[in-house]
Amino acid sequence: MQMLQYSLKPDNFTFPFLVKASSARKSVAEGKQMHGQIVKYGFEIDTFVVNTLLYFYSAAGEMVSAKALFETSPNLDVVSYNTLIDGYVKCGQVDDARDLFDTMPEKNEVSWSSIISGYARNGDLDVAQALFDKMPVKRNVVTWNSMISGFARSGLLPMARNLFDEMPERTLVSWNSMISGYAQNGQLESARELFDQMQEKDVFSWSSIISGYAQNNRCREALNLFKEMLSENKVRPNEVTMLSILSVCAQLAALEQGKWVHAFIDKNKMPHTDSLAAALVDMYMKCGCVETATNLFRKLDQRDVSTWNAFITGLAVNGVSHDSLEAFKEMQRLKINPNDITFMGVLMACSHGGLVREGQKHFTNMSKIYGIQPEMKHYGCMIDMLGRAGLLEEAEEIIGKMPMKPDVMILGALLGACKIHGNVCIARRVGQDFFELKNTEGGCHLLLSNIYAASGRWEEASEIRCRIKRSGFKKEPGSSCVELEGTVHEFVEGDTSHPQTGEIYLWLDEMVKKFRSEGYSPVTANVVLDLGEEDKEMCVTYHSEKLAVAFALISRAAGPSIRIVKNLRICCDCHLFMKYLSSFMRADSSGSVLGKVIFPAENFVDKACTLQATWYLTLWWEVRSSSGVGIHTFSQANNHV
């Protein structure tokens, strides 16, 4: 503008810089004003100027304006075509890009790369491969990377790997595409093998491998990689990295590490985006720090639906059903549209609060008022809610009316309710449905066997166990993890691998002996193996949560609180044992034990919340003592089958 004030006439070199400046500022209005000035001064026929305008409109997604400019420009070159093709591709208009590509009088490697990239991004890999194979010009690394990325994103990893092995030169994008593809498809060993071979790693390399371990519930490996990333001090974590690590801390309920991550985010002035804010709220909620999570949520300047989801669901899984439902009402008052994840939290709140009729109302309203069709996970919440209330016939009726076939979670929830309420008839019908799924997860089969055994139907229980052995069904192994001084220790039932096994078992034996003198008697009703009573008692004595809490208490690093996170339901004996332990610690001058049960079912990573493969029951035990500072987390399956 100052040029015009001084009567200095812009030329064909000046305008491209001005247009690029408008593009950098993402100012469409300013760019269009420049276009007007270009026409005024007669430079609309200059190819260099026109190509800059084409880039501006394409980058802004203004493809109608870009096409109009292209069609009215008399002097076009290969750059003009490539710019418009690239704009179409980035806007997802691959058919328009192909039409233009086919009319090009001359094509270069950029032309071919752009159209191949468009088809690869769009998932049209057959077309992309055909174009890739008949390229008459030398393929550049961008073209190779587009094909590899397309195959990897589509889960066609062998084809992606073949291209990766064939390509003449590789860039970080090549390596990262393969690592991300392997990680997202659960092939972590292959991902790690490539990751370790990389001479140079960037933040995307680290984030991809860490995210892969986090999403596949290999939390300790994810934490170790994060520590390695920081120790190398070559690459700074980005938001994706922090989302993955916060997810890991939430899964492990590793509060101290979660606090450290939060401090790292603030220290490095990383903006609290909606995704990051939701992940922080979710982490504190899963660590049982409801007040901290609430304060964090209330201090946020902006709250989108993902943040509300983390808050509503977090309150629900911590057993604060009333507050969870009040938060949902507040969300409605603020006219923030709920989504499918919101209703997961609402239904869980109703389930945990025993609010069956209110839960049924919300289940109906989600489709009737909000147009959100219930998914399998919503039906799972309904079955859990009705099962807890003993309304097994209603639960079975809902399963029969579902628009999709019930999966293992749905049937498992109803089977669990049948076990609690002793309903063998419904359990038998559900068991038949489960066998028809041909699922290799043995947990529900064992649950059905336990139901039969508990009702004295030993022959049927034995028959199911024989079927399990013949079919090779597998039960998810139970484990308990405890975080001490930044190290995660894992235990399984009857574990003898820990260096302090002798001390742990001695402590448990002494506690059992002491509690017996006070009236404790091991609960062995759920041990359905053909064993004597003494052997049954031995089975329940060394469950992994007991091993973990013993280790935490005898360790000098055990601090003011111990958190036990069970991935499956706690057994009656462990619950009783912890009650006696609580009484003992309260009576002892060294401290006290407090406990409460919550029931989390989801893992929030970012705006796309993913439902875990298993329902979770979380038991928090706070142990207040005078020694050390630390948070301890355990996760264990109910193994007494």
Image (cartoon, grey):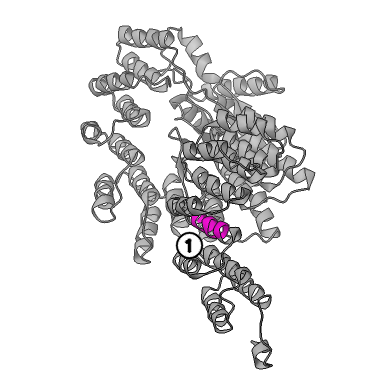
Locate residue 451 relative to residue 535 in the image: left or right: left
Q: Does residue 158 sit above or below 403 in this rendering?
A: above
Residue 378 falls in image quadrant: top left
Q: How crowded is mark 1: few (under 14 residues within 10 Å), some or many (20 or more)?
A: some
Towards the viewer: 473 or 491: 473
Write down the region rendered in magenta.
Answer: 81-90
Q: Is residue 621 visible?
A: no
Q: Does residue 35 sit above or below 152 in this rendering?
A: below
Q: In which quarter of the image is the C terminus?
A: top left
Asked if residue 80 is among those painted magenta in the image, a careful observer would answer: no
Where residue 183 appears, as percent x and y from the top left, is: 58, 35
Where residue 373 appears, as percent x and y from the top left, is: 29, 46
Locate residue 346 relative to residue 283 in the image: left or right: left
Asked if residue 88 is among those painted magenta in the image, a careful observer would answer: yes
Towards the viewer: 536 or 498: 498
Residue 404 falls in image quadrant: top left
| Residue beneath the point at 34% across and 14% down | 453
Q: Can residue 271 be seen in this view?
A: yes
Residue that extends furthest to the bottom in the rendered view of this protein: 6
Where residue 321 appears, as percent x and y from the top left, is: 38, 50
Q: Quadrant of the N terminus?
A: bottom right
Which SS type dominates the magenta stretch?
helix
Towards the viewer: 105 or 449: 105
| Residue beneath the point at 57% across and 53% down | 106
Locate residue 113 relative to residue 414 in the image: left or right: right
Where residue 109 appears, as percent x and y from the top left, is: 62, 48
Q: Does residue 95 sit above or below 545 in this rendering?
A: below
Residue type highlighted by circle 1: Arg
Towards the viewer: 99 or 572: 99
Question: Residue tagged by mark 1?
Answer: 303
